[in-house]
């Protein structure tokens, strides 16, 4: 059965799948570009991975006294809305200073499906693009391992409907992470984890008296590292 | 030493963030009753996240057809903006076989049989019938369907052809009826609201209308179309 709406939904899913392809393409292009930066004395790392997030909003839906007035006792469910587990693409450039210490600049992008949930039921509440740019300090530990931490900005944008319809949201973000590298040839292979925390609120949330709160993101990454730098 | 300060500072910031709550929205404090006035009252609504497919049957007169289509588009946009998290979409479809709802002028030939659940009169009306056991909606059988092929139409919205000369009234009436389609089974006692019982004074959901539909779409329904 060919239905206009079904086609629209399919197009939306295709667009999301297309973002994955764009992400993979971006990793490839960045890997090529990394060689040029390497020539300028920087270490460059291209990473791909997955990232999960805590809720962007928790909505109580109805005031208890009104729930009673409306005769709905116990039938109204609280709501959580947030990005699903999403692919994460990131490129980072770093330069060493001091022993085992490096300064790193990184930019990442995660296209996610926005999901709503209430009492075990879930629905698709739109799409969201999450981009971040972070300045990090990175410290080598025990040879192949490192820990890192930094500050930056994170930006959420979405469609014309739903939680982000009032426009993109940009907030400061705090990040910590760590990982390891293996010299299995050139480039080197890395694995890592990262955790980010930032405040979030949107115009739509404010319209109904909502207030900002903290969102957590946790991700795992595989990377290719080019050039010399602190591992 | 320098590195130690950075890491301890980072740890302190993490601890500070951890002490904070998630982003929250408080419960709505303004809304009116929306359950059908049956005994006992029945809450009906579409499943959360559903795209509700509407066939706009504007008839053969191009101007009247365009008026009804434009009224639907505006009404649908107003209600979609009234919810926060994509709880529903209202989308126009071209064929009765694809439709959950039919919106038509009262004098337009309908693609469904209505003898089992005939629409009442009035400026505009939303018609649906619950099954005998009250657990679902009776389908409106498609005239074009082979025996047993009932289609998916569960609601019928008719707008009096007498209203076709007043575009503003049609916009308001259609937006109001879409509120009933979504599951608002009663009228607001406040005449300023889109879902008031009289002729609506607006084509846009008010704050109370918005609060009502926001609560409705997170209330466990008794019946799902």
Image (spheres, coloured by chain):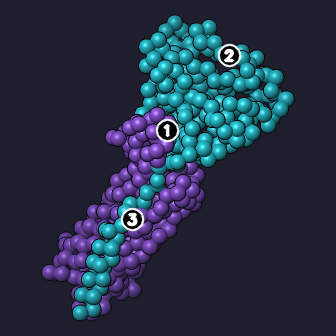
| Chain in cyan colour | B
Name the spot of residue B105 as percent of width and height, x first: 74, 22
> Which chain is disc 2 placed on?
B
B50 to the left or right of B206? left
Name the spot of residue B7 as percent of width and height, x first: 27, 82
> Which chain is disc 1 placed on?
A
Instruction: Classify 10 Å Cα crowding around label 1: few (below 14), some (14-19), many (20 and above).
Output: few
Q: Colour of chain A?
A: purple
Under tag 3, what secondary structure?
strand
The residue drawn where x is 80% and y is 26% is B163
The residue drawn where x is 48% and y is 25% is B42
Answer above or below: position of B113 versus B193: above
> Which chain is disc 3 placed on?
A
For mark 2, what is the residue?
Answer: B120
Name the spot of residue B144 as percent of width and height, x first: 60, 12
Which of the numbered marks, if any, corresponds to residue A69? 1
Q: Quadrant of residue A215?
A: bottom left
Task: Give the mark count.
Answer: 3
């Amino acid at each position: 059965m060919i239905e206009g709406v079904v086609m629209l939904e399919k197009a939306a899913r295709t667009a999301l799948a297309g973002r994955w392809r764009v992400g993979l393409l971006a990793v490839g292009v960045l890997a090529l570009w990394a060689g040029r930066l390497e020539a300028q004395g920087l270490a460059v790392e291209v990473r791909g991975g997955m990232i999960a997030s805590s809720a962007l909003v928790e909505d109580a839906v109805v005031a208890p006294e009104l729930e009673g007035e409306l005769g709905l006792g116990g039938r109204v469910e609280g709501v959580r809305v947030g990005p699903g587990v999403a692919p994460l693409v990131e490129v980072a450039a770093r330069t060493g200073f001091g022993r085992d210490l490096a300064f790193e600049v990184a930019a990442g992008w995660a296209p996610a499906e926005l999901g709503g949930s209430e009492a075990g039921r879930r629905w698709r509440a739109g799409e969201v693009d999450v981009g971040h740019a972070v300045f990090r300090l990175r410290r080598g530990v025990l040879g192949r391992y490192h820990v890192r931490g930094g500050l930056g900005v994170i930006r959420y944008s979405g469609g014309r409907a739903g939680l982000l319809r009032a426009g993109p949201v940009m907030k400061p973000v705090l990040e910590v992470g760590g990982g390891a590298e293996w010299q299995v040839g050139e480039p080197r292979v890395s694995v890592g984890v990262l955790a980010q925390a930032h405040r979030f609120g949107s115009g739509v949330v404010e319209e109904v008296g909502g207030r900002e709160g903290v969102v957590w993101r946790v991700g795992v990454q595989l990377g290719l590292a080019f050039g010399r730098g602190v591992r | 030493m320098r590195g130690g300060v950075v890491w301890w500072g980072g740890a302190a910031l993490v601890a500070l963030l951890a002490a904070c709550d998630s982003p929250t929205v408080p419960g709505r404090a303004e809304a009116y009753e929306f359950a059908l006035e049956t005994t006992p009252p029945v809450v009906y609504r579409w499943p959360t996240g559903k795209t509700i497919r509407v066939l706009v049957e504007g008839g053969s007169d191009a101007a009247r057809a365009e008026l009804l289509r434009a009224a639907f588009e505006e009404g649908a946009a107003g209600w979609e903006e009234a919810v926060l998290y994509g709880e529903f979409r209202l989308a126009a479809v071209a064929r009765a076989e694809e439709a959950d709802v039919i919106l038509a002028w009262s004098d337009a030939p309908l693609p469904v049989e209505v003898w089992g659940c005939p629409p009442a009169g009035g400026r505009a009306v939303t018609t649906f019938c619950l099954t005998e056991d009250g657990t679902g909606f009776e389908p409106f059988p498609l005239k074009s369907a082979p025996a047993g092929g009932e289609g998916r139409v569960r609601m019928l919205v008719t707008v009096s052809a007498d209203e076709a000369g007043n575009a503003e009234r049609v916009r308001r009436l259609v937006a109001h009826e879409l509120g009933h389609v979504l599951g608002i089974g009663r009228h607001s006692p406040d005449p300023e609201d889109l879902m008031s019982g009289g002729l609506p004074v607006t084509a846009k959901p008010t704050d109370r209308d918005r609060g009502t539909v926001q609560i409705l779409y997170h209330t466990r329904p008794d019946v799902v179309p």
